[in-house]
Amino acid sequence: MESKVSEGGLNVTLTIRLLMHGKEVGSIIGKKGETVKKMREESGARINISEGNCPERIVTITGPTDAIFKAFAMIAYKFEEDIINSMSNSTATSKPPVTLRLVVPASQCGSLIGKGGSKIKEIRESTGAQVQVAGDMLPNSTERAVTISGTPDAIIQCVKQICVVMLEVQSVTMGSPPKGATIPYRPKPASTPVIFAGGQVRADPLAASTANLSLLLQHQPLPAYTIQGQYAIPHPDLIGCIIGRQGTKINEIRQMSGAQIKIANATEGSSERQITITGTPANISLAQYLINARLTSEVTGMGAL
């Protein structure tokens, strides 16, 4: 995310990068490019889409703040329309949230999170959107993904607040020595998120590509075969945050991911709990992503355990 402020300080131009999978990109391009053309004309923002045959693409939106927010609104409402249309051919009973992923320099993420997670908590509470800052940088870059989920209106308000934080950071650091050049994330073809261990097909949490996760968030067709993956949660407070009050959070993760999730009781003399996830590779990838997002949020709020 970059900004350029005029001498008068009133006309602020922003550049925001989004990470999208192929179907999302196809949705905003539209037939013969009609949709993206309309978005450009009505918002006044420049919308550029990276080239390549990768499962993920970078969408760069540049313009004055008002134009940026109009473009975001059009994209968010288009994705909501896609979700509603996909549900007509689905057995799902509840509408999943619209999800967008910003690409933000890692050096700016600390200000977005705030001391003890105070800033990101404030943004969540004031907008109603879910905001997750990835703990790891995107491959071969110094950028991190910031995932925003919610209604289109909540997402728009959330993006506005994030832009304000980023502009404040740049205003404070203007004239200061740079912290190092940002290495931008450039999507590459994804590897298969499945490994073979002892003759059993298992999901590898570290190999699950963000492309598969974002495909699932838009309810794309899933592979027909199922696999099983297991991993342990060592801290009892963290297992509680995954389960939620009366099981609300874990049920929400089951519903969104389509995976079967079982949490074993702790063995004697240990507080460690085993989580078993069963489903298609894509089901498991999304379930792991949602669980890790909950853990990241909890750790950010609690401090180091």
Image (cartoon, rainbow, N blue to C red):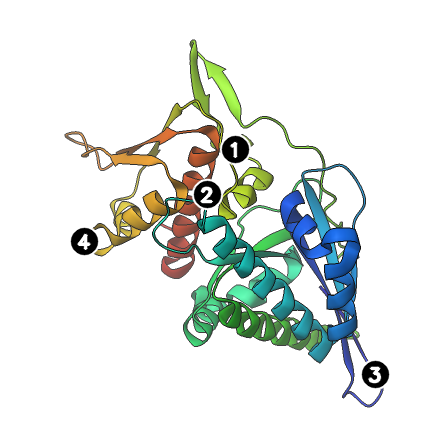
The reply to whether discs 3 and 1 touch (Cβ–Cβ < 8 Å) is no
Nearer the camera: disc 2 or disc 1: 2
Residue type beneath disc 2: Tyr
| Earlier sequence position, callout 2 versus callout 3 | 3
Q: Earlier in the sequence, mark 2 or mark 1?
A: 1
Query: If you read the primary sequence from the N terminus, does the residue marked by circle 3 or circle 1 appear first?
Result: 3
The residue that disc 3 covers is 6
92, 169: nearer the viewer: 92
Residue on which the image places disc 4: 246
Q: Is residue 49 visible?
A: no
Name the residue at 78% across, 84% down.
Answer: 11
Disc 4 secondary structure class: helix
Question: What residue did someone put label 2 on?
Answer: 289
Which percent across, then down, holds residue 248? 25, 53
At 39% from the left and 49% from the top, the residue drawn is 295
Mark nearer the N terminus (4 vs 2): 4
Q: Are marks 2 and 3 in contact (CB under 8 Å)?
A: no
The circle on residue 206 is 1
Between disc 2 and disc 3, the foreground one is 2
Q: CA distance from mark 3 to mark 1?
A: 43 Å
Earlier along the polypeptide chain: callout 4 or callout 3? 3
CA distance separating discs 4 and 1: 30 Å
